Image: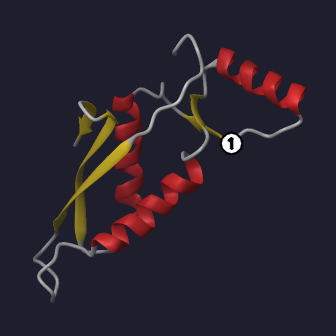
Amino acid sequence: MCANLHGHNYEAWIHCCPIDDLDALGRVIDFGVVKAKVGAWIDSHWDHGFVLWTHDSAGRAAMQAFEASSGLTQKVFWLDRNPTAENMAAALLEVARSILSGYGIVVEKVVLFETPRCYAEVS
């Protein structure tokens, strides 16, 4: 847990390999499919919101206090693990594998950049 609620501007790289061979156009997968499917999940669940650990009682209290005092509802994704870059990359790997199953590929790894020079890689 971090001492203060704060945000990051993450960048995610999703690495895919074909199960059998390249498609008829010579691609592993159309990048647009990866962006549309995984990107839509990120937009829906993580983008412009807080990713908090389900066991973060201070984060839960802060969200409740904010909502009570402002009358606004804050977008929160409750992660089953502490939302470090490493754990978020692992969670995104699981999500990408699930979302992209059936496309004839294996999602081999996710690289999640917290800053341009700091990243976590999970495979």
The residue sitting at 68% across, 42% down in the picture is 75
The residue sitting at 24% across, 37% down in the picture is 121
Q: Is residue 60 left or right of residue 78?
A: right
Q: Is residue 22 left or right of residue 33?
A: left
The residue sitting at 57% across, 49% down in the picture is 45
Measured as percent of width and height from the top left, residue 99 is found at 42, 63
Q: Which residue is mark 1?
A: 75
Q: Amino acid at mark 1?
A: Lys
Q: In the orientation shown, which residue stands out farthest toward the front? A: 116
Measured as percent of width and height from the top left, residue 61 is found at 75, 19
Q: Which image quarter holds the C terminus?
A: top left
Residue 71 appears anywhere in the view: yes
Q: Is residue 95 above or below residue 86?
A: below
Q: Is residue 29 left or right of residue 7?
A: left
Residue 100 appears anywhere in the view: no
Q: Callout 1 environment at 10 Å: few (<14), some (14 to 19), or many (20+)?
A: some
Tag 1's secondary structure?
loop
Measured as percent of width and height from the top left, residue 23 is found at 17, 83
The residue sitting at 39% across, 46% down in the picture is 92
Measured as percent of width and height from the top left, residue 93 is found at 34, 48
Residue 114 in which image quadrant: top left
Please state which of residues 7 and 105 is positioned toward the viewer in this rendering.
Answer: 7
Q: In the orientation shown, which residue stands out farthest toward the bottom? A: 24
